[in-house]
Image (tube, rainbow, N blue to C red):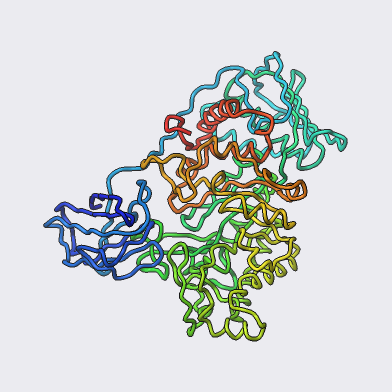
């Protein structure tokens, strides 16, 4: 049974006023407390009908002024700073409780998440995305064969089969030596990364190197998918070279946890659109998603949150135990899948901030006499590890070594973002360190990141971090920098000689809403990001030639505070991820938005055939 309530949100001069109302309705116990998550914390002094008992991050626990048995209506009213402009801003994960008795509360209304319905493809309807530099579509019509004959051992036929298996209503190819010929050949003198010729005599993929083969194979997969759906396609020739070597997609699996199967399925789609890096955000305040042999408490404690857990509910996870953790076997299988697709997995261990889950699981990392006073952006006052403690150094270095054994790629992301002002200033250990070093406790951040940079390098990998990793200019210019709050930090890092991946929120954060409509889900702290805004982004604008050469790529990021399911993730990604694919490839340098939009419309229909729950054009792109 669920209880129905209503929420009345009104703007005020200082922020918002929110009233929660329950009509009289059956309740099986006398509720004494109300709990929920809320984007902008309430002002405790403004509460009417209850008192604030506990607040951790976005989770609030209120004690009702009068226990409620459901016989009479119930109202709780309060105010807070900030804006609650969207349905996804409302209180979420609400439940009433009395001890271990709990009852979920439902508010009316749902955000708009309408997805397109797959439509038949017309014969001859061919689109490639991202648009290659050279494309010549012939008048020769080719009927889809029943059989394909792949020559050579480079082909990823299991990838093709997985994609075809997602088309339940389409005829699929059989693989036979007597089928339509598909060949590959290596040519180091090729002017482009790849060239793909498709004609009556078969398909020939010529590639300059292994990366060129992978890009050409992805276009071949696009053709084959459309061929089986359309029945007849024109012969064609295409060739090209990606603008950037790093073409990334980021996914936060901490705020909301995603099983390994959809993640592996998304890798198939990312590779299809020429993405070659998967940035896996695996740790944060709200969970730790990698099992550890050295510290089993991470899987037992840090991976879970709920009313009876060390970590309380967050981001609307509500009254149930929520979370999960990836085993070493799952991670290795995913890394192997990615490698076969030409994708490098970039793991992120976010330190020294965003570490509340780690601290809850390993209390030995908490200094008992630390009197530091701070508040993180996510409203925590206990989420920063202390590099001045020997235990911190031991734990983080041990975990880095474990992760380096799990993740075979060359890049290791160390986080480094959003360390709140005031951390370590009241720590005796930090004060002792500062006196010994002749420095300030403020310097711990940069020094710690430089130490971890060296630890990662000792394992043969290269460190990465969000733009704050340059704090104190302590890390070397070998460390890669991801610019997220805007373009400025990335530009400064590139001018200073760092390799840079541009991922400014204003163009690349797809947890941001597409529009300002209240029903349109997503955040808006950096504005809204529609399809045109994502596609028109120019990553090297405003840079000197030398600095522009340091921009290694572009990345789309999906944070999951308000993204709770795989279908919701796909709704936020598509079609905007298609725009980032073109930016990373460089298509928007030689094409126009109207032509891209036509390709996006076509490929959203193809994605619908593949079972992807993207955003319907009727909602606006």
> Residue 226, how many percent across, how many down?
61, 26
Residue that appears at 23% across and 52% down: 3
Residue that appears at 69% across and 72% down: 451
Q: Is residue 564 above or below residue 607?
A: below
Tell me, yes or no, if residue 276 can be seen here: no
Q: Identify the residue at the far right of this view.
A: 189
> Residue 85, how many percent across, how many down?
36, 47
Choose top left, top right, bottom left or bottom right for residue 44. Answer: bottom left
**53 left or right of 613?**
left
**56 left or right of 544?**
left
**194 left or right of 397?**
right
Give the total number of marks visible in the rendering.
0
Residue that appears at 52% across and 38% down: 574
> Residue 188, how many percent across, how many down?
86, 38
Q: Nearer the viewer, residue 410 or 301?
A: 410
Residue that appears at 62% across and 28% down: 592
Choose top left, top right, bottom left or bottom right for residue 498. Answer: bottom right
Q: Is residue 116 above or below residue 276?
A: above
Q: Nearer the viewer, residue 591 or 546?
A: 546
Q: Nearer the viewer, residue 588 or 339?
A: 588
> Residue 25, how many percent across, how many down?
15, 53
Q: Is residue 356 above or below residue 132?
A: below
Q: Nearer the viewer, residue 190 or 522?
A: 522
Q: Identify the residue at the far left of this view.
A: 71
Tell me, yes or no, if residue 74 can be seen here: yes
């Amino acid at each position: 049974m669920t209880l129905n309530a209503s929420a009345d949100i009104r703007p005020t001069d200082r922020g918002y006023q929110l009233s929660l109302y329950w009509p009289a309705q059956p309740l099986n116990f006398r509720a004494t407390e109300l709990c929920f998550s809320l984007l902008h914390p309430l002002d405790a002094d403004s509460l009417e009908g209850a008192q604030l008992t506990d607040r951790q991050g976005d989770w609030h626990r209120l004690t009702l002024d009068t226990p409620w048995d459901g016989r009479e209506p119930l109202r709780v009213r309060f105010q807070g700073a900030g804006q609650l402009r969207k349905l996804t801003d409302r209180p979420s994960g609400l439940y009433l409780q009395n001890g271990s008795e709990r009852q979920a509360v439902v508010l009316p209304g749902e955000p708009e998440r309408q997805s397109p319905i797959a439509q038949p493809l017309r014969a001859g309807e061919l689109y490639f995305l991202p648009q290659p530099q050279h494309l010549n579509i012939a008048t020769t019509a080719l009927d889809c064969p029943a059989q394909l004959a792949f020559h050579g051992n480079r082909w990823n036929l299991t990838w093709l089969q997985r994609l075809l298996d997602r088309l339940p209503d389409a005829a699929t190819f059989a693989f036979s030596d007597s089928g339509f010929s598909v060949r590959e050949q290596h040519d180091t003198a090729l002017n482009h990364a790849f060239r793909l010729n498709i004609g009556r005599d078969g398909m020939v993929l010529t590639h300059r190197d292994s990366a060129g083969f992978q890009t050409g194979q992805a276009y071949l997969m696009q053709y084959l998918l459309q061929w089986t759906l359309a029945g007849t396609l024109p012969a064609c020739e295409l060739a090209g070279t990606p603008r950037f070597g790093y073409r990334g997609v980021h996914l936060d699996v901490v705020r909301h946890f995603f099983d390994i199967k959809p993640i592996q399925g998304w890798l198939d789609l990312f590779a299809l659109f020429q993405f070659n890096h998967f940035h896996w955000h695996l740790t944060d305040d709200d969970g730790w998603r990698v099992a550890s042999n050295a510290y089993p408490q991470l899987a037992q404690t840090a991976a879970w949150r709920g009313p009876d857990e060390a970590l309380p509910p967050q981001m609307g996870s509500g009254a149930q135990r929520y979370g999960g953790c990836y085993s070493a076997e799952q991670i290795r299988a995913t890394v192997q899948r990615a490698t076969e697709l030409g994708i490098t997995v970039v793991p992120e261990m976010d330190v020294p901030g965003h570490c509340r889950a780690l601290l809850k699981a390993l209390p030995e990392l908490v200094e008992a006499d630390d009197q530091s006073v701070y508040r993180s952006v996510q409203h925590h006052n206990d989420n920063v590890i202390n590099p001045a403690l020997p235990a911190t150094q031991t734990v983080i270095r041990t975990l880095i070594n474990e992760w380096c054994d799990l993740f075979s790629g060359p890049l290791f992301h160390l986080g480094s973002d959003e360390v709140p002002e005031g951390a370590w200033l009241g720590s005796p250990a930090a004060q002792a360190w500062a006196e010994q070093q002749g420095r300030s406790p403020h310097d711990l951040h940069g020094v710690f990141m430089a130490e971890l940079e060296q630890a990662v390098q000792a394992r043969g990998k290269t460190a990465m971090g969000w733009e704050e990793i340059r704090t104190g200019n302590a890390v070397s210019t070998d460390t890669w920098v991801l610019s997220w709050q805007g373009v400025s930090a990335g530009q400064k890092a590139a001018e200073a000689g760092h390799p840079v991946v541009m991922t400014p929120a204003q163009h690349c954060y797809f947890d941001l809403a597409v529009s300002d409509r209240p029903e349109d889900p997503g955040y808006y702290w950096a504005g809204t990001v529609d399809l045109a805004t994502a596609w028109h982004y120019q990553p090297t604008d405003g840079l000197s030639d030398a600095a522009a050469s340091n921009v290694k790529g572009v990345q789309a990021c999906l944070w999951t505070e308000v993204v709770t399911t795989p279908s919701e993730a796909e709704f936020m990604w598509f079609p905007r991820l298609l725009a980032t694919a073109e930016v990373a490839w460089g298509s928007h340098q030689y094409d126009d938005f109207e032509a891209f939009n036509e390709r996006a419309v076509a490929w959203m229909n193809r994605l619908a055939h593949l079972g992807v729950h993207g955003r319907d054009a009727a909602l606006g792109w």
